[in-house]
């Protein structure tokens, strides 16, 4: 099992939770360095302008036929890779499109490539489509690196709820037609029902349980994605709830709310697994501790995958999901098209295909990928709704409607590095 010493936070980003923002937490040094020059280079093809290249989606499909779309996405999720290769790509081929998956270790790598090519004046960029959200999307918006104004052209956007805040706002950055939704996620805790007979019902209660049961709880060390989310959840809890914390980062808001969260985690540290001397490197390492009976709780931003993990024996059959009275944080993942993509029409066609009820239902199946749909099923035709009604229920994971009850939005992406750095200095470094 891979365990990271708290004083060495580098190189911790390769986790198994199926979301791209974990990769967004890797250093964006190159993206930042190229930001100003890329903004100037992209001015002639500004991603902020409404898409006027096509008069309608039929024009898009006609232009897309025969194209090759390079989808850059995190390559460490085996189920995600298999879904794209075995389900989405064959469906794209029926439209005359070759969908080619380009695996990356960090989503920031895709943006860095885009910014480098824009800076070089290339209008035939090698990146056509990116699985993205969070800080990488925000950085790309600042650099005018994304094509915008195109998602309203997608017929399958009619199946989404235009008022859904998870689809209109990405970690504090307005989407504004610059990325198409792909799937939703809900941060979720789980526990071993054989060893925890009376699970807590709030995050404050979970921390109290950990102090009352020394050595039986831990969390991945930030800046690992899962550990970083847990840190933000503690901040929201100690602040008195999500309504008390501004989504937009400011020094004032940080000074008001961060100290209580950091103090709570400092106080908790002696009660953690190995007394906080080491922390799991990532979610997978925490899962291994849970599976080996060394801790009684785990956490994930990909709860739908728990079914497959239990069925495969990676997690024990006694695994149960813990729902909290105050709810947990939720978000959505998206597909974005770079402003200089060579095969933009093909990328738009693939994004629309990925939003189809057929693809969304296939992707939601636990054995395929187990991702929650971004569609509003009430907007579907009966035959389309039947695709989702036919999905197998899970003895482990409640329906998304139950998981997301009292859900709150992610804090703005600027909160993330500030909190992670403060945790390293005060908790891990103390």
Image (tube, rainbow, N blue to C red):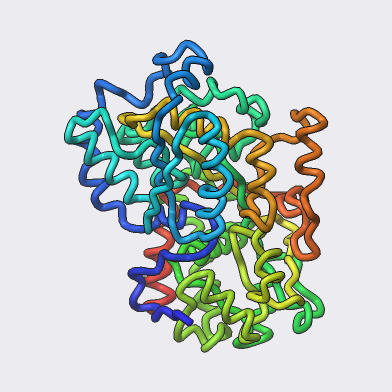
**Viewer-closest of 76 and 66:** 66
> How far from the left and from the top, in percent, is residue 364?
67, 49
Q: Residue at x 35, y 42 (%)?
A: 139
**Viewer-closest of 351 and 6:** 351
Q: Residue at x 73, y 54 (%)?
A: 403
Q: Residue at x 61, y 46 (%)?
A: 184
> How far from the left and from the top, in percent, is residue 86?
56, 49
* Observer able to see residue 232: yes
**Quarter of the image where one finds residue 42:** top left
**Quarter of the image where one finds residue 44:** top left
**239 over 176 or under it: above or below:** below
Q: Is residue 137 left or right of residue 408?
A: left
**330 over 428 or under it: above or below:** above
Residue lying at the far top of the rendered structure: 55
Q: Residue at x 80, y 64 (%)?
A: 395
- Number of callouts in the render? 0
**82 over 396 or under it: above or below:** above
**244 over 40 or under it: above or below:** below
Q: Is residue 60 left or right of residue 306?
A: left
Q: Is residue 281 left or right of residue 202?
A: left
**Viewer-closest of 122 and 215:** 122
> How far from the left and from the top, in percent, is residue 325?
75, 58
**Quarter the C terminus occupies:** bottom left
> How far from the left and from the top, in percent, is residue 318?
76, 77
* Observer able to see residue 148: no
């Amino acid at each position: 099992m891979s365990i990271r010493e708290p004083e060495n936070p580098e190189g911790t980003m390769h986790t198994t939770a199926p979301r791209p923002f974990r990769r967004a937490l890797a250093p964006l040094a190159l993206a930042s360095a190229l930001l100003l020059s890329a903004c100037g280079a992209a001015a002639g093809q500004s991603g902020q302008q409404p898409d006027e290249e096509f008069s309608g989606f039929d024009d898009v499909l006609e232009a897309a036929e025969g194209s090759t779309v390079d989808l850059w996405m995190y390559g460490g999720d085996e189920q995600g890779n298999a879904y794209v290769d075995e389900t989405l790509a064959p469906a794209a081929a029926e439209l005359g499109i070759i969908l080619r998956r380009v695996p990356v270790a960090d989503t920031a790598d895709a943006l860095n490539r885009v910014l480098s090519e824009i800076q070089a004046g290339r209008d035939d960029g090698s990146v056509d489509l990116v699985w993205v959200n969070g800080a990488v999307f925000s950085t790309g918006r600042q650099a005018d690196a994304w094509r915008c104004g195109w998602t309203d052209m997608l017929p399958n956007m009619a199946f989404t709820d235009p008022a859904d805040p998870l689809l209109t706002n990405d970690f504090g950055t307005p989407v504004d037609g610059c990325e198409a939704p792909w799937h939703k996620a809900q941060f979720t805790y789980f526990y071993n029902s054989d060893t925890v007979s009376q699970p807590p019902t709030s995050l404050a209660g979970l921390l109290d349980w950990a102090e009352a049961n020394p050595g039986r709880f831990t969390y991945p060390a930030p800046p690992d994605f899962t550990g970083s989310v847990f840190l933000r959840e503690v901040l929201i809890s100690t602040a008195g709830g999500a309504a008390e914390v501004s989504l937009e980062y400011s020094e004032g808001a940080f000074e008001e709310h961060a100290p209580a969260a950091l103090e709570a985690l400092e106080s908790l540290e002696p009660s953690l697994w190995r007394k906080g001397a080491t922390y799991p490197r990532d979610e997978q390492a925490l899962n291994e501790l849970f599976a080996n009976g060394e801790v009684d709780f785990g956490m994930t931003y990909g709860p739908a995958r728990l079914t497959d993990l239990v069925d495969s024996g990676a997690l024990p059959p006694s695994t149960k999901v813990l729902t909290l009275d105050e709810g947990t944080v939720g978000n959505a993942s998206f597909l974005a098209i770079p402003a200089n993509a060579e095969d933009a029409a093909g990328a738009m066609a693939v994004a629309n295909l990925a939003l189809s009820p057929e693809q969304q239902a296939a992707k939601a199946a636990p054995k395929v990928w187990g991702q929650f749909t971004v569609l509003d099923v009430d907007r579907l035709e009966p035959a389309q709704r039947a695709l989702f009604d036919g999905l197998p229920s899970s003895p482990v994971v409640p329906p998304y409607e139950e998981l997301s009850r009292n859900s709150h939005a992610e804090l703005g992406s600027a909160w993330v590095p500030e909190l992670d750095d403060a945790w390293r200095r005060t908790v891990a470094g103390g």
